[in-house]
Amino acid sequence: MTQHAGRLTCPRCGANNFSTVTACWKCSAPLNAAGNPSASAAAPAYPPTPSVERAAMAPVTYAPATADGDPGVARRAAIALALLIPWIGLPVGWIFMMIEDSRKQAVGRICVLWSTIALIFHLFLMYALAAQMVPYLQMALGITRNTLQNGGKGGGLGGDLEGGGIR
């Protein structure tokens, strides 16, 4: 068993373990660490498992893991980001387009495209809302103008406030 900077190598299977554990995570062989007071210094080495036992064990299979991830999920995430927060989706898409991986560049192009569409839609929506607000803004400016012309005594909607009250 070898020890490197807080890590232990199992003498049985060669797995890398933390120096704080008493048994190997992979094969459950007891580990003796110099920094571990609970481990006994005189513990015998764990005997290797015979090949008959290994053959009797069922192999563990996992789904093949890809380092690239699912491209469909990446595209859907890019579209969701672009539509929900286009002001952030646009620079994120640009950043992805600068990466040398062609799949990430494709995701970046999708994000930029949908962010641009969403930004144009947002600008039209803001224009429509601003156009609807014009009468209200004009009314508020009229009230402010009347108040200033009456010397700060109010004025409201142009009513007569002489004498301190509305008649």
Image (cartoon, helix red, strand yellow):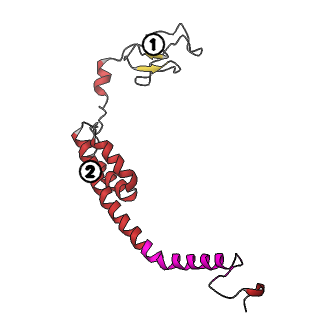
Q: Please tell me in which quadrant of the rendered image residue 80 appears.
A: bottom left
Q: Which mark identifies residue 4?
A: 1
Q: Is residue 126 left or right of residue 112?
A: right
Of residue 154 and residue 129, the one placed in the foreground of this image is 154
Give SS at disc 1. strand
Residue at image coords 30%, 37%: 62
Quick one: quadrant of the N terminus?
A: top left
The main secondary structure of the magenta stretch is helix
Height in image: 62 above or below 2? below
Q: Residues within 10 Å of mark 2 (few under 14, many from 20)?
A: few
Of residue 89 and residue 157, the one placed in the foreground of this image is 157
Residue 140: say if magenta.
yes
Cα separation between marks 1 and 2:
42 Å
Residue 26 placement (x, y as % from top left): 40, 24
Three-letter amino acid code at the position of disc 2: Gly
Residue 94 placement (x, y as % from top left): 31, 45
Height in image: 42 above or below 28? above
N-terminal of the pair, mark 1 or mark 2, is 1
Which residues are the magenta region? 130-156
Of residue 25 and residue 124, the one placed in the foreground of this image is 124
Q: Please tell me in which quadrant of the rendered image residue 119 appears.
A: bottom left
